[in-house]
Amino acid sequence: MTTPVVSELDPVTERIASRFITAVEQADFDTILNEIYAPDAVIWHNNDNVCIGPTENIRVLTWLHSVVTDLRYEDVRRLPTPNGYVQQHTLRAVTPAGDPIEVHACFVVTIENGRIVRLDEYLDKAASRPLDPYRPTA
C-alpha cells in the first residue's frame, strides 16, 4: 500500500518530482535520462561524498533493481526551495534473502529549465547494510 505524498510544491515542480519517483520505482531509466535529468546533472550521496552523472546514477539504479524487489518510496514529504525542492522519504524494498529494508533519506533537488540539474541524497547508510553482500566489487 502506497502512502500519500505530502507536498507544498507548485504544480510544475510537483510534476517533475512525482515523475522522477515513479520512474525510479518502475525502473523507467529512459525517462530519467531523457526527460528528467539534465544531460550534465550532478548526483551526490552523503555516504560516499562522490559526485556522479546521470549515466552512472542509472547504473546504480539498475543494480538496485536487479537486487531488490518491491522497491517503493513511502512517507514522502516535499517542501519547495527557491530553485527546486527538498524531499524526505522512506525507501522500502525486499532483499534477495526476503528481508525488508527501510532506508530513511532526503533529496535536495535543484531544477533548471524543467530538468533536475543537481540531486544531493542524504541517506542512512546503516539501514542499507543488508544490501552489502550484493554490491558489485569492481
Image: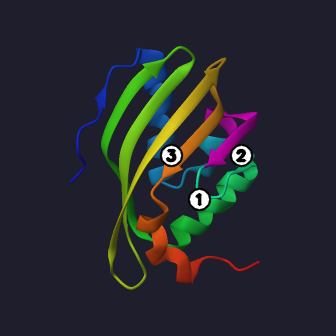
| Residue segment shown in magenta | 34-45
Q: Quadrant of residue 119?
A: top right
Pick whichever, 76 or 123, lies toward us. 123
Question: In the structure shown, which secondary structural element does the residue marked by tag 1 occupy?
Answer: helix
Q: Distance between the residues labelled 3 and 1?
A: 11 Å
Q: Distance between the residues labelled 3 and 2?
A: 14 Å
Q: Give the percent coordinates (x, y) of residue 57.
A: 67, 53
**Is the residue under label 1 in contact with that under label 3 (CB below 8 Å)?**
no
Q: Give the percent coordinates (x, y) of residue 89.
A: 36, 45
Circle 2 Cα neighbour tier, 10 Å, few/some/many (<14 / 14–19 / ≥20): many
* The N terminus lies in quadrant: bottom left
Question: In the structure shown, which secondary structural element does the residue marked by tag 3 occupy?
Answer: helix
What kind of colouring is applied to the model shown? Answer: rainbow
Which label's residue is closer to the chain start, 3 or 2?
Answer: 3
Q: Quadrant of residue 80?
A: top left
Q: In this picture, is 122 found above or below 126?
A: above
Q: Give the percent coordinates (x, y) of residue 60.
A: 64, 61
Where is mark 1, residue-wise? 61
| Amino acid type, mark 1 | Leu
Give the number of the disc on residue 6.
none
Residue 37 part of the magenta-drawn span: yes
| Amino acid type, mark 2 | Pro
Give the number of the disc on residue 23.
3
Question: In the structure shown, which secondary structural element does the residue marked by tag 2 occupy?
Answer: helix
* The C terminus lies in quadrant: bottom right
Which label's residue is closer to the chain start, 1 or 2?
Answer: 2
**Residue drawn at point x = 44 percent, y = 77 percent:** 130
